[in-house]
Image (tube, grey):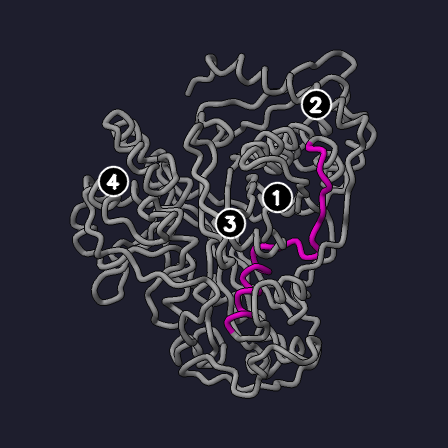
Amino acid sequence: MLIKVSGGLYFAWPRLLVEGRVLLKTYKLGCVLDQRSGVDSTRDDSGSGDPSRRSSLGLILAVDAGLSVNRAILFDGFGNLIAESKSELTIEQPMEGWAEQKPETIWNATRDNIRSILSKREGLSEEIIALGLTAHMHGTFLLDEEGRLARERAIVWIDTRTGDLINRFRRDGIEDEIFKISGWKLITSMQLLHLRWLKENEPETLRRTRCFVACKDYIRYKLTGEILSDFTDASFTGLFDNVKRRWSEDAFHLMGLDPSIAPEIRESWEVGGFVTEEAARETGLKAGTPVTVGCGDVAAMALGGGATEDYQLLANIGAAGVYERPVESPLYDWENKNYTIASHAVPGKWLLQANQMSAALTLRWFRDNIFSGSIPFKGFDELAAKSKPGAGGVIFHPFLQGERSPFVNPNAKGLFFGLTLKTELKDLVRAILEGVAFAARDNLELLTRVRGERKFEVIMGGGAANSREWAQILSDVTGYTVKIPKVNEIGALGAAILGSLASRLYVDHKEATEKMVKLEKRFEPNSETHMKYDEIFDIYRKLYRTLEPFYRP
């Protein structure tokens, strides 16, 4: 069965998108990259000089391969979005609970989006100084000894076939051992479970496998011929020691797996290879263009949003909600095991991370299923503004696909609570925005209670960041200042920042983020509204604790 996952899941309020046309400045290439080493042969290695001159040296192409939407986005050295091409992808579900994608389909979409951008002006490929990569995480892409696919389809993160394995490993105490190594409790998305499932159900597939990689790694392989991964994707597998920052042979042996199938790991901002002649013919890129090692989308979003310090919280509210906090040491959640730990794409930093299953997707569900898409998203913003904080007494639970954090329950259900004859459409819409914000606060509190109090701020990304009303609600609910990046596609911008480092346009992450990340909107919490939301948030949490025994498959 084929399920088409619309790109609209990552919806945006109406805004100016550079799509279908390219707005390009004229650049003069002021450096020549040595294709063997990636060294800029004309650049002052001290990093001195005029930053604006360095930023005008060329363009950076970012590939952001999402599960449902594949994007290629062109940026200049200041982080301005110049052009974008995107295409929708399908997820195959050959059996109930399975979710798979064909790596070749992902590559074809990447190739076509790159060609679409480069076709807009002759000679554009000459101006691209690097290609940055990011993609969805937890995918299991298998290669054999010859570099061919060992399995036609990759298992992707929304696949739930490994649920029985989790129950078994929990009973046997293996889950606790994996947590001690990786800082991860077992979830169905993890590659260590995918690989164990293959060992038990498709042993021939695993015997053919020479190496497993993540989605962005497969794209890099097709571009450069290099097979390797980075620390961010490795840290998500459950097979990686997040303290020692290396593959754990103990974790492999606990799963009955051969450690030799693990790929080489490099830093995300390093050069991971150069565009081959074959890839150049397919994409239109210049052969020899450096390609970053790249990082997983969770790290790319944090980097592209400018979340690099421990007082900064990222709330990326797209179809799902991704919540992150950078920290300077791998702080495992020994007590509750609620959040996860991952390597950041920044030197010496880790990410505390929590995921909400349904965030902005809930508003799309409401529009498409209640009003058949007859209300534009901008209209929802206007409706929500007409309802007062508290939504006329209506509370919404956004658990339309179960929940993963701050509690794990795949059977959790969505809810409108407090309906009366006086309830109006505006109240229902505001309740949805507030409910998602309550879920965001619930997850952010997992991350902020670690290592004492800080004066936190929230960087908000995703489709919801295009809604002024939603941003203000998030600020009022959390009590934090909320900042909105100028570039909404922060994952792609994060990949572009890595490209700026690989090409040595900037000397370090600090300089690159200062020049390329722009936070252009700011929302401050209203103290009275925050106090009101404190009371409602308490009810919100009591409701799901009360209802939890009634959640059934």
- Furthest toward the right, the residue is 386
Q: Earlier in the sequence, mark 1 or mark 4?
A: 4
174 in relation to 190, above or below? above
Marks 1 and 4: which is nearer the front? Answer: 1
Percent of width and height locating residue 532 = 76, 22
* Distance from Cα at disc 2 to Cα at disc 1: 19 Å
Judge from the rendering whether residue 464 lies leftward or rightward of residue 547; answer left or right.
Answer: right
Specify whether residue 479 is painted magenta.
yes
The kind of secondary structure element at disc 4 is helix
The kind of secondary structure element at disc 1 is strand
Marks 4 and 2: which is nearer the front? Answer: 2
Residue 197's label in the rendered image is 4
Q: Earlier in the sequence, mark 4 or mark 3?
A: 4
Amino acid type at image mark 4: Trp
* Distance from Cα at disc 1 to Cα at disc 3: 14 Å
Judge from the rendering whether residue 530 lies leftward or rightward of residue 370; answer left or right.
Answer: right
Q: Which residue is mark 3?
A: 328
Q: Which residue is mark 1?
A: 313
Q: Earlier in the sequence, mark 2 or mark 1?
A: 1
Task: Please rate how many residues cluster around mark 2, counting C-alpha atoms within 10 Å: few if below 14, some from 14 to 19, many from 20.
Answer: some
Percent of width and height locating residue 304 = 60, 56
* Distance from Cα at disc 1 to Cα at disc 4: 35 Å
From which residue to which does the magenta span run? 478-502
**In percent of the image, x 60 and y 24: which residue is there?**
397
Percent of width and height locating residue 545 = 53, 16
Q: Which residue is mark 2?
A: 534
Percent of width and height locating residue 361 = 59, 37
Which quadrant is the C terminus positioned in?
A: top left
